[in-house]
Amino acid sequence: MRRIANILKWVLLLGYFPVMLAFVSASNRAVICSDVRVVVRDSLETGFITAAEIRRSILNQYPDLLGSRMQGLNMNEMEAFVSKSSFVRNCQIFNSPSGVLNVVVKQHQPILRVFASDGTYYLDESGRKIPVSKRFSARVLVANGNIPADRTDLVRVAGLIDSDPFWKAQMEQIYIRRNNDYVLVPRVGDQLILLGKPEKVEEKLRNLRALYDRGLDPREWNNYQLINLKYEGQVICSRKRDF
């Protein structure tokens, strides 16, 4: 009897799951899109685009979205549409059992604002251009002067500064001279820092940090207008701006 009972139990279980799966599948097919909910994960740090703007653009692109069956939505296509924005780094879209279409967006994070002959724009850590927004101005390093067409070195130098909390707080501007010498402008003080060619930048910044930490007395900084890091293994302080 026990064996027969066990067999009946398994038969019932094996019959139950297909029925439930069919029921769930039918329920999913019947789910209607009732709302679009957008979350911009990094909106506290960056404000290039808002959740309301993304929601509005989706509903404009897909005017029949609300009231449509979830099963018929091409979410990969919708993700690709949202990701076309110059401000969007990536996008994920998924539905909930209640019929809400969830859109999760991350923005491009600028590390540098460039003022160049071809316009003003931001660059992220990969060198991707991000247009300037009327709504939001990122507080990042500024670059101007003779901006090269190949911005690889510029992005690398800006990335080194942006990734270090000390330098990020200390430096305000990168100026590129015609001979491709880089000049750093600190936020505080009248000194200019001649970095020279964008080579061995990590070493040059280490030498500069040693000067900040163990070199000049804070009262002496205003006596110097140029800190020259151009030559390997040397930090030369000059009272003249003429360089």
Image: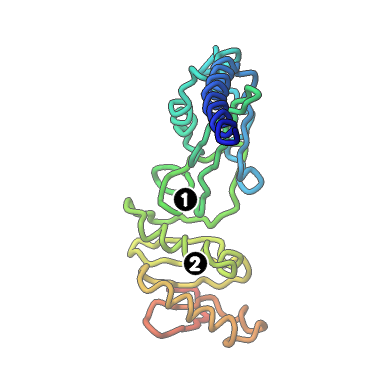
Quadrant placement of the C terminus: bottom left
User: Residue beneath label 1, please?
Assistant: 124
Q: Residue 199, relative to residue 140: is it above or below?
A: below
Q: Position of residue 8 (x, y in %)?
A: 56, 28
Along the polypeptide, which appears first: circle 1 or circle 2?
A: 1
Nearer to us in this view, 39 or 12? 12
Q: Secondary structure at mark 2?
A: strand
The image quadrant of residue 52 is top right
Quadrant placement of the N terminus: top right
- On residue 141, which mark appears? none
Nearer to us in this view, 100 or 202? 100
Residue found at x 41% / y 61%: 156
Q: Position of residue 27 (x, y in %)?
A: 59, 18
User: Residue beneath label 2, please?
Assistant: 184
Q: How is the image coloured?
A: rainbow
Q: Is residue 165 left or right of residue 206?
A: right
Residue found at x 40% / y 51%: 127
Residues packed near mark 1 inside 10 Å, few (<14), some (14 to 19) or many (20 plus): some
- Residue lying at the far front of the rendered structure: 1
Amino acid type, label 1: Asp
Q: Residue 197, relative to residue 15: is it above or below?
A: below
Amino acid type, label 2: Leu
Q: Position of residue 18 (x, y in %)?
A: 51, 24
Residue found at x 59% / y 70%: 166
Q: Position of residue 135 (x, y in %)?
A: 62, 37
Residues packed near mark 2 inside 10 Å, few (<14), some (14 to 19) or many (20 plus): many
1 vs 2, front mark? 1
The image quadrant of residue 54 is top right
Q: Secondary structure at mark 1?
A: strand
